[in-house]
Amino acid sequence: MSLPLERPLAGLSAIVTGAGRGLGRAEALELARLGAAVVVNDYGRPGRDGSGEASAAPAEAVAAEIRAAGGRATPHLGDVADHDSARELVELAVSAHGKLDILVNNAGILRDRMIFSMSESEWDSVIRVHLKGHFNTTHFVAAHWRERFKAGEGRGPVYGRIVNTSSEAFLAGSAGQPNYAAAKGGIVGLTTSTALALAKYGVTANVICPRARTRMTEDVFAGFAEPEGGGVDPLAPEHVAPLVGYLASPAAARVNGQLLVVHGGMVAVVERPRVAAKFDAAKETFTFEELDRTVGGYFAGRPAGETFAASEVLGLRRG
């Protein structure tokens, strides 16, 4: 990791969750490279399904890597899906660096199963880590920023940036991941709500859908060969980290409540849903026959496999 001459995040502090490996690690390194002091959070369990013993080693290794390059970093072993642990994480960032300016939520697990085979625990655990984990950290950092704003007695907005992590699985409707797709869809709703609620305090909240070769996706991308001759892997997490660094910076002040797909040297801004058709009842309310004629007639003329899922996003690539 090399430090650039101009560091747009100098003087700012950040939390990156799930930062011991993969995407979170790349994001933590990038924020530090841009000048931020980083709290590196990771629960350290070895299994991508959240199994195994918790370990401080992954977070400590990334924090050491940042410090060796001349940056500032503090490791944190903790489960962000636990409300008290998330509170302690935010408190650590504030006590270590005087304030907290940036939150990057990345921690997650996978427990894939078809909907008819999924157990209650497989559903609950994924929703807990992804969606509740995002809520917990957002709740405490939002309270921190609100308190700072009120303490300023109208002298201006605070500085706050949230970057949340959704997935193309939510956009495309991944058939074997009903828990994961639901959690990632919920994160989008959480982000847009947060963006509206905190804008008046000077805070932005955006959500990314990254595609990267990590411990969680090693089997998904097993058929995608890495480039020969030392080229950059199109699925490397390092393609995602620069966008996170940008969204965390003062330069992105006008970017708020947005959903962006990022991978392989490409960023796509996803447009919000549009109304495709509208039907009005002839009288005060619809009859069954009228609905069959209007709504049914509309769908009779559309492709059978076309749903709200945006599977075409999976074909996005640089070029």
Image: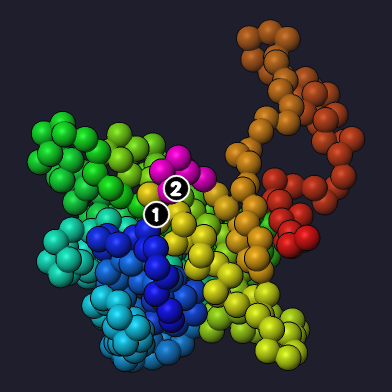
- Left or right for 198, reference 271: left
Question: What is the span of residues highlighted in magenta in the rendered image?
Answer: 251-258
Amino acid carrying label 1: it is Ser
Check disc 1 and report its element: helix, strand or loop.
Answer: loop
Q: Amino acid at mark 2?
A: Ala
The reply to whether callout 1 and callout 2 are in contact (CB within 8 Å) is yes
The residue indicated by pointer 2 is 252
Q: Nearer the viewer, residue 185 or 192?
A: 192
Closest to the observer, 73 or 43: 73
- Label 2: which secondary element: helix
Quadrant where the C terminus sits is bottom right
Quadrant housing the N terminus: bottom left
Q: Identify the residue at horizontal 64%, vertical 15% (top origin).
A: 285
Compared with 3, 246 (above or below) is above
At which x and y percent is residue 249? Answer: 39, 54
Q: Residue at x 31, y 66 (%)?
A: 36
Q: Is residue 100 above or below residue 196?
A: below
In the displayed structure, does residue 10 sit left or right of residue 28?
Answer: left
57 inside magenta stretch: no
Q: Give the x, y percent position of residue 179.
A: 53, 65
Colour mode of the rendering: rainbow
Q: Residue at x 55, y 75 (%)?
A: 237
Q: Label 1 belongs to which residue?
A: 249
